[in-house]
Image: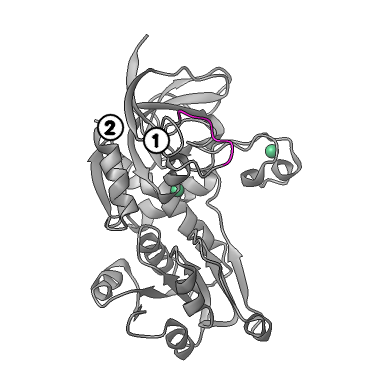
Amino acid sequence: MAKMRAVQVPNAKGPFQMVERDIPEPPPGWVRMRVEACGICHSDSYVKEGLWPGIQYPRVPGHEVAGVIDALGTGVAGWKPGQRVGVGWYGGHCGHCENCLRGDFLFCTVERRITAITQDGGYADYMITPAIALARIPDELSAPDAGPLLCAGITTFNALRNSGARTGDLVAILGVGGLGHLGVQFASKMGFRTVAIARGKDKAALVKELGAQIYIDSLAQNPAEELTKLGGARVILATVTSGKAMNAAIAGLGVNGKMIVVGAADEPIQVAAPLLIGGRRTIAGWPSGTAMDSQDTLAFSAQTGVRSRNELFPLERASEAYEHMMSGKARFRVVLTMK
Ligand SMILES: [Zn+2]
Ligand SMILES: [Zn+2]
């Protein structure tokens, strides 16, 4: 049997192991991808640290996977070997539970599949995935370009396009890291009056390059007061993983303003009830999206020039690459390449 390299986590909190495995055969309805690049996401820590209930080990992480279709299982329609495809967090659904029948596949209650949680992911030369989870990659995007767009990208793109903000509205991106540096680009390309909020003077030039019109340095300025001076934000997209940073910005929402939380902060978000009532303000969360949302994210990025800024590591340095991502020092996404 032909073999491949895979980087697996043997058990919760265990070390990454580079192993040789049989190249998997796709079951009916699934395809096999030859992986070209796979982004490393903070959510890979669910696998590494055993934070996801019921996860089976060993498990191969990686849910920002870009590659080429290599083989089709029986019954797969609409795809053929050689097509460039990607797969993100969403990894399949049952199609017959109530949420699926309402078209809300992400909340499937019977067979909710998540790439690299319920099935092995993309830290490998090959992986298999349900065909329903595939998104087409446009020619303009390289595999390392596409990888981070399949989780960090879709999450910020989809949250913004479903936020209710309209062209010209004041939209603030809180945090300029892996998610935020994409959020700023998307907000700007979608035609919002884009504010970036981050810590320190050194980010000012960068956020302008990414398309922000206004920069708020939260070390030197009060984000809520600055947003209020600008008329109040229609949307604050909270990409930070700090509840305190979110709390410091909430009062900058304008009337009907909405804070959309996409950063998985451990600390609670605290807000005074009158602030919500008085301005009809809301706080909401947003998960990533389905395969078509990924495809839309990739197409929009190809069309408008939105790109993730990546640091590339070869597959065999996955452990080091993961630690670099977790250190918070990566500028801005870390991507594994397979060649
Ligand atoms: Zn992710
Ligand atoms: Zn379902």
Q: Is residue 298 visible?
A: no
Density class for disc 2 (Cα within 10 Å; few <14, some 14-19, many ≥20) is many
Look at 35% across and 57% down and name the residue there.
306
Look at 54% across and 30% down and name the residue there.
130
Q: Give the x, y percent position of residue 255.
A: 60, 83
Quadrant location of the N terminus?
top left
What residue sits right under mark 2 in the picture?
A: 338
| Helix, strand or loop under label 1 | loop
Q: Give the x, y percent position of residue 317.
A: 24, 37
Image mark for residue 3: none
Q: Give the x, y percent position of residue 205.
A: 24, 74
Q: Is residue 179 visible?
A: yes
Amino acid at pointer 2 = Met
* Residue 252 vs residue 247, the one in the foreground: 247
Considering only order in the chain, which callout, 1 or 2, is on the residue closer to the N terminus? 1
Q: Give the x, y percent position of residue 336.
A: 29, 39
Image mark for residue 14: 1
Q: Which residues are magenta?
A: 53-58
* Residue 258 vs residue 157, the one in the foreground: 258
Secondary structure mostly seen in the magenta stretch: loop
| Helix, strand or loop under label 2 | loop
In reply to whether residue 235 is colored magenta, the answer given is: no
- Circle nearer the viewer, 2 or 1: 1
Image height check: is 159 above or below 63? below
Whether residues under marks 2 and 1 lie with C-beta atoms below 8 angstroms apart, the answer is no
* Residue 13 vs residue 190, the one in the foreground: 13
Q: Residue furthest top?
A: 1
Q: What's the coloring here?
A: one colour
The alpha-carbon separation of the residues under discs 2 and 1 comes to: 23 Å
